[in-house]
Image: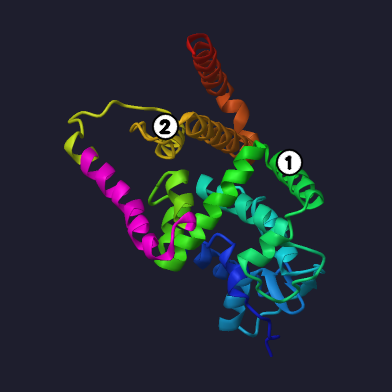
Amino acid sequence: MLQHLTIDPEFEGKIPPLREEELKQLEENILADGVVINPLITWDGVIVDGHNRYRILQKHPEIQFTTYEKKFPDRYAAIAWICKNQLGRRNLTPQQFKYLVGQQYKAEKSSHGGAYRKGHPSELEKDSIYQNGKSKERMNVTCERIAAENGIGRNTVIRAEQFAKGVDAAEETEPGIKQEILSGSIKPTEKAVAAIAKAAPEERPELVQKLRQAKEAKETGKQENEPKCKPKRSTTATLQAIRDISANMVQSNGEIDADDICSELEDALDTMIFRWDTCLKANKKQRAACQKGIDRLTEKGIHYLQNTRRTT
């Protein structure tokens, strides 16, 4: 008989979902092996890693599996572990990466030695923990550590938390939009997403709709201005990375200030570093074959940054 384990919606919601073909492949692999090779990670009978495998087991209760029980002081420590564990995946979108960093930072700030072991305190209760100077110092240390672990700046961690809060607020307003944002099917600016969490509840539906309208406007403009003959490109993956970064940049409309510009440039740089690290680390064997291309792109980037420094 299948051992009963609990699926906590908040825990599962932190984990980027598998694509349909990935889930199908996972099920086929488990059925072929006749056993779930890696243990499901649990905390007091609640799954913290292995939700997809457990759902497959519910369909095939004859399959054998094991569990590994981890200890956490509270549910926020468990969430922080989930996020950090997922950040080790190679196939995250930039939006998923940003969301997980923000959720990890938020959870670590909320974790307080088991004071909220199974409860769901309000944002006011959680934020009140960090009002004194000692706790603020602890927050800074936490922020710096998460930044160092992920090769990004501390300001990016802070903005990632605001982005994560905005994504959750948008999902509460219109279920389903979280996946659209994190998968990259719509690419609103970080500032537009963060603004949703800061807005009054009655203002949020309109702001959420604007996230999709930006995509519709972009697609309409693309169709109207589509050239008849597209130039041939040999570095498709590089061009896609550039498009992903550009889509996240705030377009100048007279409403952004100096801080916004620096924040967007830092976010774009961190995204570029993340994508390069992910690509190069995941394809070490193939790296030698394209080293000349990597060198060329590196020189191009260096030239651009040096030219930017001279002209600003």
Q: Is residue 6 above or below residue 165?
A: below
- Residue visible at 36% across and 27% down in the picture: 233
Q: Is residue 70 above or below residue 246?
A: below
Q: Is residue 199 left or right of residue 44?
A: left
Task: Find residue 10 and report its horizontal and vertical position in percent.
Answer: 60, 70
Give the residue furthest to the bottom. 1
The reply to whether discs 2 and 1 touch (Cβ–Cβ < 8 Å) is no
Q: Main secondary structure of the magenta part?
A: helix
Q: Residues within 10 Å of mark 2 (few under 14, many from 20)?
A: few
> Is 225 in front, or is 159?
159
The residue under label 2 is 239
Say if the magenta span includes residue 33.
Answer: no
Q: Secondary structure at mark 1?
A: helix
Dividing the image into 4 quarters, which one contains the N terminus? Answer: bottom right
Q: Amino acid at mark 1?
A: Glu
> In the rendered structure, which segment of residues is drawn in magenta?
197-221
Q: Is residue 264 left or right of residue 152?
A: left
> Is 134 in front, or is 251?
134
Query: Which numbered dot is residue 144?
Result: 1
Using the rendered view, name the quadrant where residue 230 is placed.
top left
> Is 305 in front, or is 50?
305
- Residue visible at 39% across and 52% down in the picture: 185
Query: Which numbered dot is residue 86?
Result: none
Using the rendered view, name the quadrant where residue 243 is placed.
top left
Which marked residue is nearer to the observer: mark 2 or mark 1? 1
Q: Is residue 163 above or below residue 251?
A: below
Task: Find residue 293 and report its horizontal and vertical position in percent.
Answer: 52, 22
Task: Find residue 152 and report its horizontal and vertical position in percent.
Answer: 65, 37
Q: Is residue 27 above or below residue 45?
A: above
Q: Secondary structure at mark 2?
A: helix
Q: Is residue 10 left or right of residue 40?
A: left
